[in-house]
Image (spheres, grey):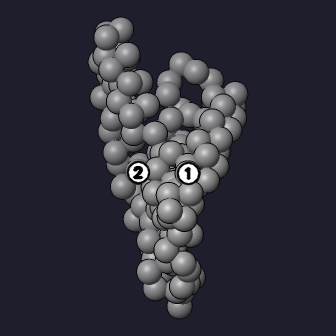
Amino acid sequence: MTVYLAIALGGALGAVSRYWVSSKTYLWLGTEFPYGTLMVNISGSFIMGCLAIILSEKIELPEEIKFALLVGFLGSYTTFSTFALDGLQAFQNGAFMKVALYILISVTGSLLGVWMGYLGARLLMR
């Protein structure tokens, strides 16, 4: 039961963090492109890459903490479902180039984010 509570707490914090990061990004860059969702997905991928190394190779934490961070926090922080909705709405509005660019940047940026987080954590662990 404590694992479920840990996930719920992490999820609540991740959801609030997602809203905050997304809102601040839209204030900074505007709303004509899904910058907020993009920022959340790439930064969430970076954090996932870091934590994958740190939690498996460096820091021993109770399972509840790992689940709170990876499943709860990052599960609610990253926004793949919002990414899909943003893409669909732009597609339905005929913004085909914008959709293609958004998908390309989201997927490539998230893969690069997780890879950079992974490599950065490895460098810090030396």
Identify which residue, 90 or 17, lies in the foreground. Answer: 17
- Name the residue beneath numbered marker 1: 8
Camera-nearest label, 1 or 2: 1
Helix, strand or loop at label 1? It is helix
- Name the residue beneath numbered marker 2: 110
Identify which residue, 41 or 101, lies in the foreground. Answer: 41
Query: In the rendered view, would you say 33 is above or below 18?
Result: above
How far apart are labels 1 and 2 at the CA level?
24 Å
Residue 103 percent location from the top left of the image: 33, 35
What residue sits 37% from the left and 16% below the top?
89
Q: Farthest residue to the bottom: give it.
A: 126
Identify which residue, 98 or 69, lies in the foreground. Answer: 69
Residue 19 percent location from the top left of the image: 63, 36
Query: In the rendered view, would you say 46 is above or below 28?
Result: below
Residue 6 percent location from the top left of the image: 57, 60
Identify which residue, 27 or 76, lies in the foreground. Answer: 76
Tell me, for residue 81, which label it has, or none.
none
N-term mark: 1 or 2 = 1
Hey, what amino acid is under mark 1? Ala
What residue sits 51% from the left and 45% below the top?
76
Label 1: how many residues lie within 10 Å, few (<14), some (14-19) or many (20+)?
some
Query: In the rendered view, would you say 3 is above or below 121?
Result: above
Q: Farthest residue to the top: give it.
A: 93
Query: In the rendered view, would you say 31 is above or below 47?
Result: above
The answer to whether residue 105 is visible is no
